[in-house]
Image (cartoon, grey):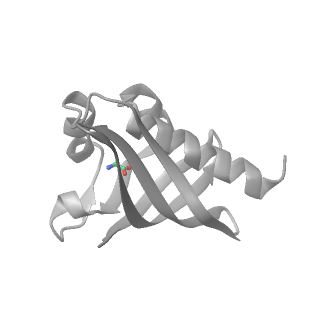
Amino acid sequence: MSDTAALLALNQRLLDAIMSADWRTYTELCAADLTAFEPEACGQLVEGLAFHRIYFDVPLHSGRRQATMASPRVRFLGEAAIVTYVRVNQVEAEGGVQSHAFEETRVWHKTESGWKHVHFHRSRIH
Ligand code: GLY
C-alpha cells in the first residue's frame, strides 16, 4: 500500500469512528492536544478531546450513518501529512437518507507510535 493510500485508509478509519461513535478508536488516532475549527465550535478554535466527547456520548442519530471522502488529496510535508476532501455524510432519517457536505482538512503527524491526528478544519457547504 502506498503512503497516500495508507493515510486515506487511516483518515477513513477516523471518519468511521466518528460516525459510529467509537470513542476508543477516536482517542487512539487523535493527539491529546488535537486542535479544531468546526461548525459545532461556533467560530472558536477548540483544543483537546473533551470538546468532542459529547458527540460520542450523545450521538445525534441512532440510524445508519456513513461518511465518504470525495476527491481526496494527500500532501506530505516531512513528518506531517495534510488530507483534504469534501466529506459527504449520509444519515438515516425519518423518510429516507439525508446527505450533508463539508469541506474538510485534517492534519496528521508521524510519531514514534504511528500517525496521530493533530488538527482539523471543517466547513459546511450550504
Ligand atoms: N468532531 C470530531 C471530528 O470531526 O474529529
> Where residue 113 sits in the image (x, y, percent)?
62, 38
| Residue sitting nearer the eye, 74 or 125 | 125
Residue 17 is at least partly visible in this image: yes
The number of callouts visible is 0
| Residue pictured at 83% horizontal, 53% vertical | 2
> Where residue 77 sits in the image (x, y, percent)?
67, 72
Q: Quadrant of residue 53?
A: top left
| Residue pictured at 30% horizontal, 44% vertical | 49
| Residue sitting nearer the eye, 99 or 1 | 99
> Where residue 9 sits in the image (x, y, percent)?
66, 45
86, above or below 115, in the image: below
Q: Is residue 46 left or right of residue 29?
A: left
104, above or below 12, in the image: below
Query: In the orientation shown, which residue stands out farthest toward the left?
Result: 42
71, above or below 22, in the image: below
Tell me the quadrant of the picture where the C terminus can be found.
bottom left
Residue 115 is at least partly visible in this image: no
Q: Is residue 25 left or right of residue 82?
A: left
> Where residue 95 sits in the image (x, y, percent)?
26, 39
| Residue pictured at 41% horizontal, 62% vertical | 120
Query: In the orientation shown, which residue stands out farthest toward the right?
Result: 1
| Residue pictured at 56% horizontal, 39% vertical | 13
| Residue sitting nearer the eye, 7 or 21 | 21
